[in-house]
Image: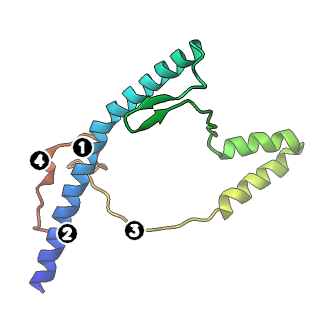
């Protein structure tokens, strides 16, 4: 029975270690994503201004080129209500439809682990290595 508890504690330690590593990687990649977006905007602007936006630029492992992409806004209840208001004149009908959609949407409930800081709140994105110490007194 003690080996089950030991394995449980090892699993917790491994989970915390992986969670910390993921947070560190996310902290490191955020400025890279921001810089990449900034560079993309500058490159796109230059290519359009110099009318080379239809050409490909050869790079070591392939090529770069511009393409048009569509970015759809979120399908929110407010958006649905606005659109329904454009085609259905009766506000009561719109309210009924929105209420129906809210009450009948599919919900999947699962159990997961959440990491909390010492003040009891869910842990923020800031990494604090001191929080990786595992206390097994209450297990």
The residue labelled by disc 3 is 111
The residue labelled by disc 4 is 130
- For the image, the number of numbered tags is 4
- Distance from the alpha carbon under mark 2 to that under mark 4: 19 Å
* Quadrant, the C terminus: bottom left
- Distance from the alpha carbon under mark 2 to that under mark 1: 20 Å
Element on which disc 3 rests? loop
The residue labelled by disc 1 is 24
The residue labelled by disc 2 is 11
- Distance from the alpha carbon under mark 4 to that under mark 1: 14 Å
- Distance from the alpha carbon under mark 3 to that under mark 1: 24 Å
Front residue of 39/105: it is 39
User: Image quadrant of residue 70?
Assistant: top right
From the viewer's perspective, is the residue at label 4 or at label 1 nearer?
A: 1
Front residue of 95/22: it is 22
Identified at 62% across, 33% down, the residue is 68
């Amino acid at each position: 029975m003690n080996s089950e508890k030991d394995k449980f504690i090892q699993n917790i330690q491994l989970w915390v270690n992986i969670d910390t590593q993921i947070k560190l990687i996310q902290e490191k990649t955020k400025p890279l994503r921001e810089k990449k977006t900034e560079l993309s905007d500058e490159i796109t602007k230059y290519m359009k201004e110099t009318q080379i936006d239809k050409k490909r630029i050869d790079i070591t492992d392939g090529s770069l080129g511009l393409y048009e992409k569509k970015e759809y806004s979120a399908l929110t209840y407010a958006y649905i209500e606005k659109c329904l208001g454009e085609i259905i004149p009766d506000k009561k009908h719109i309210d009924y439809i929105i209420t129906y959609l809210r009450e009948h949407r599919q919900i999947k409930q699962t159990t997961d682990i959440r990491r909390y800081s010492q003040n009891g709140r869910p842990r923020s994105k800031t990494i604090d290595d001191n929080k990786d110490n595992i206390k097994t007194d209450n297990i």
